Image: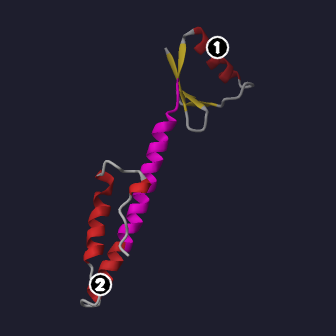
Amino acid sequence: MKQYTETVLGTFIYEGMTIPADPGNRFYKQMLEEVAAGTAEIIAFDHAAQDAADAIQVERQWRNEELATADIEVYKAEDTAGVFDATEWRSYRIELRSWPDSPDFPDSSKRPARPS
């Protein structure tokens, strides 16, 4: 059985050929006829999986930026020879590193809180 794979853009792929979802396109018409006849099937694009992957990417980017900020704050505290306490920022770095392993990841409302 032929399999047409839907893409994120709403087009379809079959054997390396991209078929636009255009009723005027003869390949699109052929695909629909084959599906109706039961000789082909459409593998639908998984939008939920894509949304989850996007959320993970956004959270990882946020975490990487926060790690860079936390590193700078720890270095500042170390460079001032005890004028500032780096303990909170070190703890924050640990929380950031473990954030992707948290069961709440990638729920941005439950991110680790930055020290004040």
Which stretch is magenta?
Answer: 43-69
Magenta span: chief secondary structure = helix
Amino acid type at circle 2 is: Ala
Residue placed farthest to the right in the image?
A: 24
Q: Is residue 23 left or right of residue 31?
A: right
Label 2 neighbour load within 10 Å: few <14, some 14-19, many 20+ = some
Q: Is residue 21 above or below residue 91?
A: above
Q: Circle 1 sits on which residue?
A: 33
SS assignment at label 1? helix
Provide residue 90's location: percent of width, then percent of height: 26, 72
Query: Along the horizontal axis of the image, is 2 left or right of 23?
Result: left
Residue at left offset 45%, top offset 38%: 49
Q: Is residue 56 magenta?
A: yes
In this figure, which residue is indicated by the disc labeled 2?
77
Which tag is nearer the camera, tag 2 or tag 1?
2
The reply to whether callout 2 and callout 1 are in contact (CB within 8 Å) is no
Residue at the image point whose x is 72% and y is 24% from the top = 23
Queried whether the magenta region covers residue 79, the answer comes back as: no
Amino acid type assigned to the residue bearing label 1 in the image: Glu
Question: Residue 105: horizontal and vertical position, in percent?
Answer: 36, 50
Mark 2 or mark 1: which comes first in sequence?
1
